[in-house]
């Protein structure tokens, strides 16, 4: 380990704030100090699990026992508090800065533990802390952008987390061992699922809820879809009793566009394909004056912040109170707590732009899950929370 180099001698203090001796502050000293901190962390977790008096727990916290510490199994003090179903302690730890989203070695957060114990009060406390935390992070993020990115952040530059990298990657349209159509991203020696046919049930239900009772469905809806993928949802739009009178598809990836051309989408009546990212068209003169009965978005390799920006444009894209908006709700969908937090976060952000959401649960675990195997990797929840947004459909709350 590299020797720790303080900015000045004034910064050389121990974990308890005491002045350090004048000897060189080397790696051995740093290791010893980390050992003290870890010991306090272990003691805090043990005290909670052993139902120690609350005074003993608070004493350890006052001695700077680290709430960020996780033991060999990945448990933190918040995990421990959730496991003993001590809601007041859970709330106290969160107020002191405990991380709501720390996951143990099995990928479980404290919220997951509370959920497994049917401890609704503790779970809600953790979930609500997560919502508050994410709201603050997104607020700070937007202000950083306005301030010309004052905070430097490490950026994941892989195709999974970079739109530009994704657009320059190679996509393969093929079929799996069961003959099911899939779209894979080829990255080195690995293949990553971009879209899988198991989403078909979700897409079918989405189109049903967006379109079937719309007053214009018998004359042909005006539809906007962002992200073609396998073309599942666009096919369901086209399969309506009366196909859309206007069907705009925004898609940027060259391999997807090639696939669309081969499948005859460029020749379908009423279909317009805009080649580029949604940011190239939405909010620009390209779609000026156009309003849609149904708007859907499902992009790949974009973060929640990008979806949040799309939300801002939704009210102007919708053709009045009968129009509907939806998106593929895969936000944090590898963990129940994360999925719940981001579902609520999306609802709050949509409400802030005047879009109210009704949610429907779709059981995806029964949709031939065995046949699809690990292609469910990016969505491991049993229930899919399907959002249908409209302009001001709910009463004021």
Image (spheres, rainbow, N blue to C red):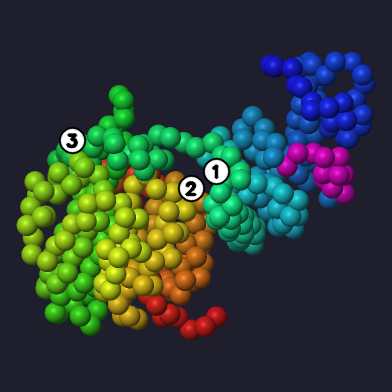
- Mark 3 element type: loop
The quarter of the rendered structure image containing the C terminus is bottom right
| Disc ID at residue 108 | 1
Question: Residue drawn 14% across and 79% down?
Answer: 219
Q: Mark 2 points at which residue?
A: 335
**Would you identify the image quadrant in which residue 45 lies?**
top right
- Mark 1 element type: loop
Q: Residues under labels 1 and 2: Cα distance?
A: 7 Å
Please, is residue 361 above or below residue 162 in the view? Answer: below
- Residue 29 point in image, percent of width and height: 81, 19
Left or right, residue 318 beside residue 75: left
For the residues bearing labels 1 and 2, Cβ distance under 8 angstroms? yes
- Residue 148 point in image, percent of width and height: 56, 49
Magenta span: 55-67
Q: Residues within 10 Å of mark 2 (few under 14, many from 20)?
A: some
Q: Mark 3 points at which residue?
A: 177
| Disc ID at residue 319 | none
Left or right, residue 219 beside residue 303: left
């Amino acid at each position: 380990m590299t020797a720790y180099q303080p900015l000045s001698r004034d910064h050389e203090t121990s974990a308890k704030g005491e002045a350090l001796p004048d000897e060189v502050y080397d790696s051995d000293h740093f290791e010893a100090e980390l050992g003290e901190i870890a010991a306090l962390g272990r003691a805090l977790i043990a005290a909670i699990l052993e139902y120690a008096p609350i005074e003993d727990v608070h004493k350890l916290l006052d001695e700077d026992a680290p709430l960020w510490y996780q033991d060999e199994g990945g448990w933190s003090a918040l995990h421990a508090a959730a496991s003993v179903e001590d809601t007041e302690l859970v709330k106290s730890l969160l107020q002191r800065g405990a991380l709501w989203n720390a996951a143990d070695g099995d990928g479980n957060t404290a919220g997951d533990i509370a959920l497994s114990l049917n401890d609704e009060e503790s779970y809600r406390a953790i979930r609500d802390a997560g919502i508050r935390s994410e709201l603050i992070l997104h607020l700070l993020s937007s202000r950083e952008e306005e301030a010309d990115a004052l905070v430097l952040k490490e950026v994941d530059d892989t195709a999974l987390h970079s739109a530009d990298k994704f657009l320059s990657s190679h996509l393969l349209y093929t079929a799996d061992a069961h003959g099911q159509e899939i779209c894979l991203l080829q990255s080195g020696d690995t293949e990553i699922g971009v879209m899988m046919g198991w989403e078909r049930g979700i897409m079918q239900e989405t189109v049903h809820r967006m379109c079937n009772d719309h007053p214009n469905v018998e004359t042909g809806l005006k539809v906007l879809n962002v992200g073609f993928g396998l073309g599942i949802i666009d096919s369901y739009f086209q399969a309506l009793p009366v196909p859309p009178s206007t069907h705009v598809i925004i898609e940027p990836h060259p391999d997807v566009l090639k696939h669309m051309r081969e499948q005859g989408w460029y020749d379908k009546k009423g279909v317009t394909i805009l080649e580029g990212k949604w940011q190239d068209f939405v909010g620009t003169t390209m779609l000026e004056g156009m309003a849609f009965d149904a708007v859907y978005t499902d992009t790949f390799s974009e973060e929640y912040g990008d979806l949040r920006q799309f939300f801002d444009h939704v009210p102007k894209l919708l053709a009045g109170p009968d129009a509907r908006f939806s998106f593929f709700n895969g936000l944090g969908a590898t963990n129940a707590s994360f999925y719940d937090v981001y579902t609520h976060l999306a609802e709050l952000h949509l409400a802030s732009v005047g879009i109210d959401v009704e949610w429907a649960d779709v059981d995806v675990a029964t949709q031939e899950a065995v046949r699809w195997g690990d292609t469910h990797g990016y969505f491991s929840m049993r229930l899919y929370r399907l959002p249908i947004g409209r302009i001001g459909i709910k009463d004021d709350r």
